[in-house]
Image: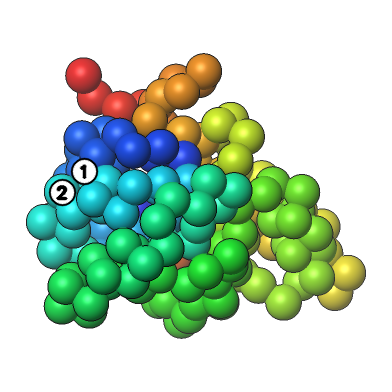
Amino acid sequence: MKLCIVSDSHDRADALAQAVGQAKAAGAEAVIHCGDLIGAQTVKPALAHGLPVHLIHGNNFGDIQALHFQMGKSGGLLRYHGADARLELGARRIFVVHYPEYGHAMACTGDWDLVCCGHSHVAGIEQVANVKGGRTWLVNPGTVAGLAAPATWALADLAAMRFEIFSMAG
C-alpha cells in the first residue's frame, strides 16, 4: 500500500489537492495529513481525488465543528482523529502527531512501524533507534503549502517500507 503524507497546508487548498493528485497518480491509496490544515474547506479539493484522508489538527486548530461537518459530508473519506492518530494501514502500525519531538519520542518506543509528524516545515526521513533494539521510520513531509520552506510532500510504500520526499510540480 502506498500513502501520501502531507502536513502544514495552512489553508492552501490548491497545493494540498495538487499533492494528493500527484500521489494518487503514483499509486497512493490513502492520505495522512500531519496537522495544520486550518480551514475545513481546505480539504474539499483534495477529497475530490477519492482517497481517504486521515487528519489531525496540529497547533492551528481551525474550526473543529466545521471539520466534523466536512467529515459527515465526505461519505467516509475524511477521518478526523484529533491531536494524534493511531492507524493500521497496509498491515503497518502508524502513529501520526504534529510535533517532531513527540514524533521522535513515539518512534523511540518501538511500538510503531512508522511515525509521521509535521510542524517544522522541514522535510525529513530517518530511522530512529528504539528501546526494543530495532529502528522505527520517522517521516516529516515538510510543508505542502511552501511556507518559509520548499513545498513538499512524501510518498510511502508500506510494503517495501520506502519513503520519498517530492517537491511540488509547478
Q: Is 92 left or right of 25, judged from the image as shown?
A: right
Quadrant of the snapshot with the N terminus: bottom left
Q: Which residue is mark 1?
A: 17
Q: Residue 45 has which mark? A: 2
Q: Amino acid at mark 1?
A: Ala
- Which residue is painted at 46% across and 23% down in the image? 147
Alpha carbon distance from label 1 to label 2: 5 Å
- Which residue is painted at 30% across and 54% down in the image? 40
Q: Nearer the viewer, residue 60 or 138?
A: 60
Q: Residue 109 has which mark? A: none
Q: Amino acid at mark 2?
A: Pro
Q: Position of residue 62 (x, y in %)?
A: 44, 51
Q: Is residue 112 above or below residue 15?
A: below
Q: Secondary structure at mark 1?
A: helix
- Which residue is painted at 11% across and 56% down in the image? 48
Report which quarter residue 169 is drawn in. Answer: top left
Label 1 packing within 10 angstroms: few (<14), some (14-19), many (20+): many
